[in-house]
Image (cartoon, grey):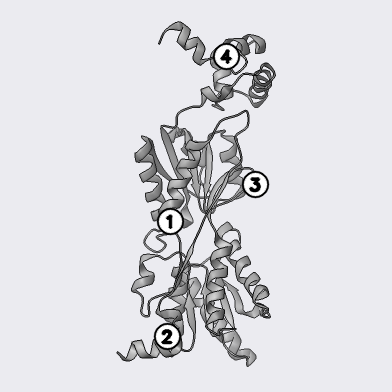
């Protein structure tokens, strides 16, 4: 590249060069480059001053966009049990596929509230970070302060780029399906509402009663004990629903919508251990469409999620960014679809299927 071509590459939309910005800000060209790329090594006051100078001179810093070569996929330790909860293993596969296509080296980092996550990330030296699932607000604030390109996957926070599935719409699909089968006492087994996706599914569950013109019974909603493993927690939650109905002398639930498939399968086992037939006595539907859903007996109805697409779109969202003085806020919501299986089949059809 000739000196003239190099100078042309550094020229802004109004003829302003990076050298002009450096001279006006009384700093080196390298310092300007680091400031406009949001790279570490500068105080926030210095970075802000250089950005303001560049803006006032009309310099286009889009050409200084750093290439993403290394990406760290950050996962909370509570999600790091791929055997019991395979959702995020599929998300990671999507991240890896997208990184492979774009020549990016991915790395997995699991962390919890007691870990020095920032220090671990410094050792990883990532050009960008993808955070999946739940993280504590303090951890998220620390990640934002690193000033690296950041994307949230299956997580949302104001002002940050995110990729999510349409959780509320998925809950509505599940509920309307159960209502269409004549089920009215539909229970919900949920998890911690600190999880964005779970909170959205709980919201969709409650809203579905209103949209269907039905009364909502709060006693039909229960939450898994956060101190237990997911399988035990979901089993105990289902047991509570049955015990509460018996103690109150009320009708038991005639259907269960669980916040994910693992919880739905645990609930199904409890119901069957009490002699309840699925779906004749109680219909059950989950969320996520994990592999075990189709292999259950009976096969589990669920809301299907393209888990790999969550990971791929997260990486692509980082690469699609058009850098300005402040990165654009972008939110991507991926669709879901209902998969009807035997666990919510019409009673007559289910009986016929069992007899053949």
Read off the residue under disc 2.
272
Q: Quadrant of the C terminus?
A: bottom left
Q: Closer to the N terminus: mark 1 or mark 4?
A: 4
**Which marked residue is nearer to the observer: mark 3 or mark 2?**
3
Name the element at disc 3: loop
Question: Between disc 1 and disc 3, whose residue precedes?
Answer: 3
- Tell me: 283 left or right of 45: left
Lower position in the chain sequence, tag 3 or tag 4: 4
Does the CB distance between marks 3 and 4 fall below 8 Å? no
Residue depth check, mark 2 versus mark 1: number of the one nearer the observer: 1
- Name the residue tied to disc 4: 18
Name, please, the residue furthest toward the top.
3
Q: Tell me the tag on residue 322.
A: none
Identify whether 304 is placed above or below 214. above
Percent coordinates x, y for residue 8 in the rendering: 51, 12
Of the numbered discs 2 and 1, the one sitting upstream in the chain is 2
Residue named by callout 1? 307
* Whole-number angstrom distance, CA of label 3 to CA of label 4: 32 Å
> Who comes first in sequence, dot 3 or dot 2?
3
Locate residue 2: give its quadrant.
top left
Is 176 placed left or right of 356 in the picture? right
Q: Name the residue under label 3.
A: 158
Q: As drawn, which residue projects farthest toward the front?
A: 14
Do the residues under discs 1 and 3 have CB atoms within 8 angstroms? no
Instruction: Give the image location of residue 276, x and y in percent.
Output: 45, 89
Of residues 62 and 244, the one nearer the viewer is: 62
Q: Position of residue 22 (x, y in %)?
A: 61, 12
Secondary structure under the numbered disc 1 in the rendered image: helix
In the depicted structure, whether residue 235 falls above or below residue 151 = below
Examine the rendering and report whether any part of residue 276 can be seen.
no
Quadrant assignment for the N terminus? top left
């Amino acid at each position: 590249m000739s000196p003239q071509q190099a100078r042309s590459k550094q020229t802004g939309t109004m003829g302003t060069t990076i050298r002009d910005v450096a001279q006006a800000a009384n700093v080196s060209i390298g310092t300007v480059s680091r400031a406009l790329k949001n790279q570490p090594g500068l105080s926030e006051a210095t970075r802000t001053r250089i950005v303001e100078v560049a803006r006032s001179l009309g310099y286009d810093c889009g050409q200084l966009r750093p290439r993403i070569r290394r990406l760290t996929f950050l996962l909370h330790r509570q999600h790091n049990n791929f055997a019991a909860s395979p959702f995020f293993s599929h998300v990671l596969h999507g991240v890896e596929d997208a990184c492979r296509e774009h020549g990016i080296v991915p790395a997995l980092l699991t962390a919890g509230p007691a870990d020095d996550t920032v220090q671990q990330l410094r050792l990883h030296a990532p050009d960008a970070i993808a955070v999946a699932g739940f993280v504590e607000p303090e951890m998220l604030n620390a990640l934002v302060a690193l000033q690296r390109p950041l994307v949230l996957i299956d997580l949302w926070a104001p002002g940050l780029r995110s990729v999510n599935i349409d959780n509320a719409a998925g809950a509505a699909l599940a509920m309307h399906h159960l209502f269409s089968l004549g089920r009215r006492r539909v229970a919900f087994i949920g998890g911690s509402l600190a999880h964005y996706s779970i909170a959205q599914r709980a919201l969709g569950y409650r809203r579905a009663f209103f949209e269907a013109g039905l009364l909502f019974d709060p006693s039909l909603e229960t939450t898994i004990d956060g101190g237990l493993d997911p399988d035990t927690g979901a089993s105990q939650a289902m047991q509570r629903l049955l015990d509460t109905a018996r103690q109150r002398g009320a009708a038991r639930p005639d259907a269960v919508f669980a916040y994910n498939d693992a919880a739905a399968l645990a609930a199904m086992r409890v119901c069957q251990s009490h002699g309840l037939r699925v779906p004749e006595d109680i219909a059950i539907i989950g969320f996520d469409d994990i592999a075990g859903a189709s292999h259950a007996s009976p096969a589990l109805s669920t809301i299907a999620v393209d888990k790999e697409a969550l990971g791929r779109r997260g990486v692509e969202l980082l690469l699609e960014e058009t850098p300005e003085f402040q990165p654009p806020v972008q939110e991507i919501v991926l669709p879901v679809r209902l998969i009807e299986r035997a666990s919510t089949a019409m009673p007559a059809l289910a009986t016929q299927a069992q007899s053949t």
